[in-house]
Image (cartoon, helix red, strand yellow):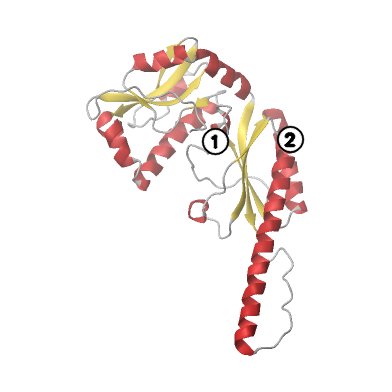
Amino acid sequence: MSSTADLLPAPGPAGTGVGMWLHGVTRDVDPALLATTVGMDGAATRAVRAAGLVAVVSAAPLSEYGEEALSRNLEDLAWLERAARTHHAVVAALSRGGAVVPARLATVHHDDARVAGQLTARRAELTAVLDRLTGHDEWGVKGYVVPGATPRPTEPAGSGGAGAAYLRRRRAQLTAREEGQRIAAEAAGAVHEALAGHAAAARRHPPQDRRLSGAPTAMALNGAYLVGHGAVAGFRRLVDALAGRHPEIRLELTGPWPPYSFADERPAGPALTVREPARGPAT
């Protein structure tokens, strides 16, 4: 399941010809933006128009982006990172010009007619999503456990020699860790609830592994919030206030992002992750 528009790739022979990589769907797009926005093949993106909607695509040689080739390449983290960054750059450029429904990463159609057919078939659904996203951006708030932010239990006195003392210390450490995780989880829940109340929509995604987040401590909150343009200042102030209210977790605000998490109504994990420096309060 994806959090982005699910325009399914058309079947067909892989490995020959050029397919159309779908970046996103909008109501309209400035031709000058397309001319200066680079797609998957390093050339300019272009528009496919149908049913009052615009699909922004770029050429995708099927030798690299066909079904069999994609199956291999999606297992290559370096290739995946390059593809995700290129795709995201196009979607981000489109979002600066207005509402966009981001396409699922690696959505490749075989020709313009297939793309146009999907726009026509899903016109009502896509139009409804664009209506809901207009005037909003996605903001991310991550919360990381702060070691030592909770009281450490006092080691109980006792006898039994060095072995018993070691076991008591280990039990105390495990208890402190479990208590810290519990308190951090409660704080993350309270932060998410407060932020969701200030947003048009909210998603709580599974915490990222440290290898992906790059953070030295565990992630307790991985929230996404759809915030109206006029509500951003208040949202930022709320994140600041919550950071002071919940020292058990370190909050990190990122955004604005294209609405990857809100391009359809089903809760789901983000389709891709692109690392950028955090913006905003949260220390």
Label 1: element kind:
loop
- Position of residue 19 measured from the top left corner of the image (x, y, whole percent): 31, 24
Judged left or right of residue 236, residue 205 is left
Which residue is the site of mark 1?
Answer: 268
- Position of residue 49 measured from the top left corner of the image (x, y, whole percent): 43, 13
Please count the marks in the image.
2
Q: Residue at x 62, y 75 (%)?
A: 170
Mark 1 crowdedness (10 Å alpha carbons): few <14, some 14-19, many ≥20: some
Residue at the far top in the pictured view:
51
Mark 2 crowdedness (10 Å alpha carbons): few <14, some 14-19, many ≥20: some
Q: On screen, 32 above or below 228?
A: above
Quadrant for the C terminus, please.
Answer: bottom right
Q: Residue at x 71, y 40 (%)?
A: 195
Judged left or right of residue 158, residue 34 is left
CA gap, disc 2 to disc 1? 21 Å
Residue type pointed to by label 1: Ala
- Position of residue 83 measured from the top left corner of the image (x, y, whole percent): 38, 38
Q: On screen, 275 above or below 145?
A: above
Q: Which mark is residue 237?
A: none
Residue closer to the observer: 49 or 75: 75
Residue type pointed to by label 2: His
Lower sequence index among marks 2 and 1: 2
Q: Quadrant of residue 131?
A: top right
Which residue is the site of mark 2?
Answer: 198
Q: Quadrant of residue 224?
A: top right
Judged left or right of residue 218, residue 54 is left
Residue closer to the observer: 64 or 92: 64
Judged left or right of residue 281, residue 121 is left
Residue at the far bottom in the pictured view:
161
Label 2: element kind:
loop
Residue closer to the observer: 77 or 14: 14
